[in-house]
Image: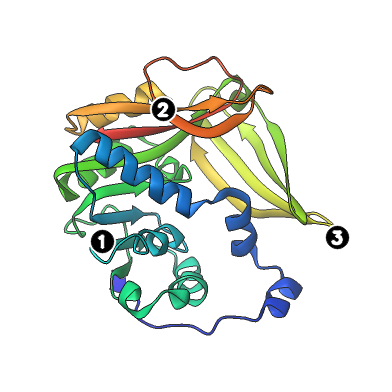
Amino acid sequence: MRRNKGLFKKPSLKTAEKHFDKYAYYSRAVQAPDVEAEFISEVYSELRGREATILCEDFCGTFKNSCEWVKQSSDVMAYGIDLDPEPLDYGYSNYFSKLKTHEQDRVHILQGDVLYPGLPKGDVVIALNFSYSFFKERSQLLKYFKNVRNRLNPEGLFIIDTFGGSLCFSPCVDEHRRRGFTYYWDEEEFNPINHHCTFHIHFKRDGEKKREKVFSYHWRLWTLPELRDLMIDAGFHKTHIYWEGSTRRGSGDGKFKRTEQGDDAGAWVAYLVAER
């Protein structure tokens, strides 16, 4: 494991557009770090009655969430952890470099494995964008959950997002329109015996050909009951579900409320929160 300290030159917007900046389009398509930071803070305050200070972002990629977290207050800090140097380098060039000096001082990025013992402790550990689904075996995911619990402070919370619904159990493509481009969430294959699945993200900028398989994921689709049982087996005290509400048209409204009763939607997204 090594700590990245270097800053990298940010490419011009013209160069980024010419060569297609996949991380920029990924962020525009599926990320909302300011909303995530607000949600994490609200959940911690709701369950613990005080403010969270230290955030650990596992599978952090470009660590945009960590950079957003430290903007909240001069009292907070963030640790990002990821194995892949490419998105980490991008994060330094495009997000870290835009922070103020006192904010940069409170962002600590580690290139390493989330299974390593002795990683930084925090009030909240997050594993978002379904990144933990990389672990396909129960023993692997249980080991990871146990490691997370060991890293949490006494009143710490572990927050992951998860998805499901009947539409997720067979190949399908969801098309989402954004300003200037369309992105596609493509489930190429699904094995009902072991829930192993392959997903791709494609992009099509207006007036251009579709860029196929810009990002690909080979995951296991874990169910909510499986994940909750694993968290309890890992030693967590209690778990909570924050379920996304629906618009009149049946799509997600981006508002998540704690509940034990979800609706039988064809596709849904929820947060799973575990108390240490």
Q: Whole-Å distance between the Cαs marked 2 and 1?
A: 25 Å
Asked if marks 3 and 2 touch (Cβ < 8 Å), the reply is no
Looking at the image, residue 161 lies above or below residue 263: below
Q: Looking at the figure, which quarter contains the C terminus?
A: top left
Asked if one can make out residue 28 in the rendered structure from this viewpoint, the answer is yes
**Label 3 or label 1, whichever comes before in sequence order:** 1
- Residue under the point 43% across and 47% down: 36
Residue 208 got which mark? 3
| Residue labelled with disc 2 | 257
Going 18% across and 55% down the picture, which residue do you hit? 121
x, y (%) of residue 29? 63, 51
Mark 3: secondary structure: loop
Q: Secondary structure at mark 1?
A: loop
Callout 2: few (<14), some (14-19), or many (20+) C-alpha neighbours within 10 Å?
few
Q: How many residues crowd around disc 1 within 10 Å: few (fewer than 14), some, or many (20 or more)? A: some
Q: Earlier in the sequence, mark 2 or mark 1?
A: 1
Q: Amino acid at mark 1?
A: Val
Residue at point 34%, 63% (across, down): 70
- Mark 3 burial class by Cα count in 10 Å: few <14, some 14-19, many 20+: few
